[in-house]
């Protein structure tokens, strides 16, 4: 073990809450390999070494947690601290797989163009090994290490420091910095000789105060900006602030109003008509100005958390070996079988004002002359035979034709491939003349498509927009929203729910670790939730409660019998639970997230595996406080014949999803997956009440303005 690393651990004992205060304290650790205090017994030595190893592991885990949201240790660039610790780790030995962020950081340092020659091109996995750099030299002369390259742009330069880094880097006090952003407030002081600008650039909910004197370059230009909402670039000295509620401020040397606010009369500079003036605005007002609401604290905080949860989603699945699959937006299948789809067509043309649009319809097929005469003869013969019924010859002909069609269909089914489609009825819209040659819709789910890749790539997920034409006006529904849909091969419902619980807990933990400022904002905001951080902490502290749908129904029946009233108090087995029932189970009865399993087959989708009782399916919903249903998942029905029957029971034509059924014919296996509405996850994390406030541009019935 490297004594350099031991020294680092001992040095950190005060600030890092470590316990290197023993015979192996800092004063007794030498830099010469192998020379430890000779007066220490072998037994004590072994115990102390174990304690030190534990302390070092703890210190590295602290660093790993810090690096979740930071590229480097102290700033947004490499410092002596990074190089020093990297050298210690390089000498000590391989980085543990339990600290992936530390490993990523080490590789970034070790592969830096200026540092790589000193390290021999090594990676975290090979740190401490003296067998050479292990890099593969390819024909192009590139030196490869087998790890993701560092995010160290050589061309891109921001040209300014983000306010988030500015406020979190005390070492910048006394230095000259450049910031850019939008003013939340501006005010004059000292008879117009001072200008105070509260500047925010969107990187954090916090702002930095910029103080500009009338002797500063660009003073008059900045003073005539129009006030709140104007954009500025300031260069000046970062100093400790004497004012309350702020740790530092910028004494501006040079300022520029990049974009004034033209909110005065007749488009003159001024803030009178700026929609997001200094006063507080309601959420509905912000929705009506969706193009400007990212400048409002509440929406900006929601978008930063949305970004963090998207990043956490990809990190969780990537680090667990899942492949990200892009599923189509345009589809001809209805995954849920609900029929609430948005159809798309090019048959209406591109001119919205055109009045003579003609849509093609299926017409009666034109008969050939000979066929018409033959048909007339048959009908005449039938009339002569009396009764108006079919002749024996006609019946035999029809039976022969039906047998031929049945034989053809059976041969096609045995061979596999796309079956012939049934002809559309006369008078129906002829989608055969449309762009895709058939009716196409916006997807309601990527599940069916991602299952195809699960059946070859094992563990996969899709994360993208989905669309439902539901005429709902609730705080929980959107017409366009994002879904996360993982699919795992060779798995059952229990494995599926283990994955879902782990994923939710990871997202919550990630938010608590990386979105501290924004969560604290929502904790105090009038639009947020008191006790938000405590509620989120409770989610990760204990396992979710698991019970069957039948057990849940019995609990709700008992609740009603004890006197509690729901809007729908007629609790019956087979009903689809409402949000009030779901929330009561997780908020009042169990006070934690609940996983409800084994639902009646009549209220679940056709693709869910039929249980042995043939009444229920292997489905599960995860119910969480404040939201109700957050996750819906199931083990998929992998038995071909049963899946065909379930399609028919659900009113879905098997031919429409022939390719999905065919997966069950060629190497089928048990598999499972779930879907999570991303916006509901953001509601759960932020404590906001309305789903319209956690998506940039909400789409609801009658609303698609922006």
Image (cartoon, grey):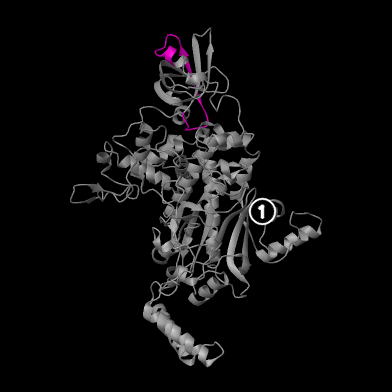
Tell me: residue 473, above or below residue 617.
above
Query: Dot 1: few (<14), some (14–19), or many (≥20) neighbours within 10 Å?
Result: some
Of 152 and 359, nearer the camera is 359
Residue 305: % across, % down: 52, 41
- The residue lying at 54 percent from left, 47 percent from top is 679
Whether residue 275 is visible: yes
Vertical placement of residue 284 versus 141, above or below: above
Give the total number of marks visible in the rendering: 1
Q: Does the magenta stretch include residue 203?
A: yes
Q: Where is residue 673 drawn, in percent x and y? A: 51, 61
Q: Can residue 668 be seen in this view?
A: no
Q: Is mark 1 on a helix, strand or loop?
A: helix
The residue that mark 1 highlights is: 579
Choose between 500 and 664: the one closer to the eye.
664
Q: Where in the figure is residue 597, as x and y percent of width and height?
A: 62, 64
Front position in the image: 557 or 242? 557
Location of residue 39 (image quadrant)? top left
Q: In this view, does 113 lie to the left or right of 418?
A: left
Give the side of residue 624 with respect to residue 319, left or right: right
Q: In this view, does 532 lie above or below 177?
A: below
Residue stretch in magenta: 201-221
641 lies left or right of 544 = left
In the image, is residue 500 part of the stretch drawn in magenta?
no
Residue 438, image quadrant = bottom left
Percent position (x, y) of residue 106? 36, 43
């Amino acid at each position: 073990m490297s004594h350099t690393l031991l020294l680092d651990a001992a040095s950190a004992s005060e600030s890092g809450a470590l316990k290197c205060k023993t015979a192996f304290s800092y004063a007794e650790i030498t830099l010469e390999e192998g020379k430890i205090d000779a007066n220490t017994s072998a037994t004590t030595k072994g115990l102390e070494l174990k304690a030190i190893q534990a302390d070092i592991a703890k210190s590295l885990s602290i660093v790993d947690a810090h690096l979740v949201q930071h590229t480097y240790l102290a700033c947004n660039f490499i410092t002596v601290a990074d190089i020093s610790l990297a050298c210690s780790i390089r000498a000590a030995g391989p980085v543990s797989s339990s600290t992936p962020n530390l490993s990523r950081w080490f590789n970034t340092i070790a592969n830096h163009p200026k540092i790589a020659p000193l390290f021999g091109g090594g990676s975290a996995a090979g740190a401490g090994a003296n067998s050479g750099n292990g890099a593969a030299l390819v024909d192009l002369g590139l030196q490869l290490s087998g790890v993701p390259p560092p995010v160290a742009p050589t061309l891109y330069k921001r040209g300014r420091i983000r306010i988030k880094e500015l406020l979190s880097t005390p070492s910048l006090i006394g230095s000259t910095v450049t910031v850019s952003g939008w003013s939340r407030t501006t005010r004059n002081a000292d008879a117009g000789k001072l200008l105070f600008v509260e500047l925010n650039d969107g990187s954090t909910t916090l702002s930095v105060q910029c103080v500009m004197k009338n002797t500063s370059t660009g003073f008059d230009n900045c003073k005539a900006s129009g006030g709140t909402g104007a954009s500025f670039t300031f260069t000046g000295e970062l100093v400790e602030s004497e004012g309350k509620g702020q740790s530092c401020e910028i004494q501006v040397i040079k300022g520029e109003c990049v974009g004034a606010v033209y909110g005065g009369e007749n488009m003159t500079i001024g803030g009178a008509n700026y929609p997001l003036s200094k006063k507080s605005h309601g959420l509905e007002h912000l929705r009506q100005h969706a193009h400007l609401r990212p400048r409002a604290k509440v929406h900006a905080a929601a978008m930063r958390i949305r970004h963090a949860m998207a990043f956490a989603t990809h990190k969780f699945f990537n680090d667990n070996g899942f492949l990200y699959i892009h599923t189509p937006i345009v589809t001809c299948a209805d995954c849920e079988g609900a029929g609430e789809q948005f159809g798309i067509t090019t048959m209406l043309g591109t001119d919205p004002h055109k009045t003579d649009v003609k849509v093609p319809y299926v017409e009666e097929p034109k008969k050939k002359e000979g066929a018409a005469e033959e048909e007339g003869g048959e009908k005449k013969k039938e009339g002569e035979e009396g009764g108006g019924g079919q002749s024996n010859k006609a019946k035999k002909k029809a039976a022969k034709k039906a047998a031929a069609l049945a034989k053809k269909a059976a041969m096609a089914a045995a061979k596999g491939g796309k079956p012939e489609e049934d002809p559309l009825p006369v008078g129906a819209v002829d989608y055969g003349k449309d762009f895709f040659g058939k009716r196409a819709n916006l997807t309601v789910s990527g599940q069916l498509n991602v299952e195809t890749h699960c059946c070859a790539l094992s563990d996969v997920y899709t994360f993208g927009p989905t669309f439902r034409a539901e005429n709902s006006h609730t705080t929980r529904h959107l017409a366009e929203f994002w879904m996360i849909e993982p699919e795992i091969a060779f798995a059952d419902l229990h494995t599926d729910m283990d994955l879902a619980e782990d994923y939710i807990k990871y997202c919550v933990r990630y938010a608590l670790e990386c979105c501290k400022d924004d969560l604290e904002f929502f904790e105090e905001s009038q639009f947020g939730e008191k006790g938000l951080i405590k509620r989120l902490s409770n989610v990760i502290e204990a396992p979710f409660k698991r019970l069957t749908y039948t057990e849940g129904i019995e609990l709700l029946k008992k609740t009603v019998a004890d006197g509690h009233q729901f809007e729908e108090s007629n609790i019956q087995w087979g009903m689809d639970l409402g949000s009030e029932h779901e929330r009561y189970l997780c908020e009042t009865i169990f006070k934690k997230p609940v996983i409800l399993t084994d639902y009646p087959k009549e209220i679940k989708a056709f693709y869910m595996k039929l249980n042995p009782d043939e009444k229920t399916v292997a489905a599960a919903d995860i119910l969480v406080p404040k939201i109700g249903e957050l996750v819906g998942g199931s083990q998929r029905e992998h038995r071909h014949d049963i899946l065909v029957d379930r399609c028919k029971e659900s009113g879905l034509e098997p031919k429409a999803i022939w390719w999905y059924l065919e997966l069950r014919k060629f190497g089928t296996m048990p598999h499972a997956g779930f879907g999570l509405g991303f916006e509901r996850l953001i509601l759960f994390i932020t404590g906001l009440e309305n789903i319209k406030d956690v998506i940039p541009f909400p789409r609801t019935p009658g609303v698609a303005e922006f």
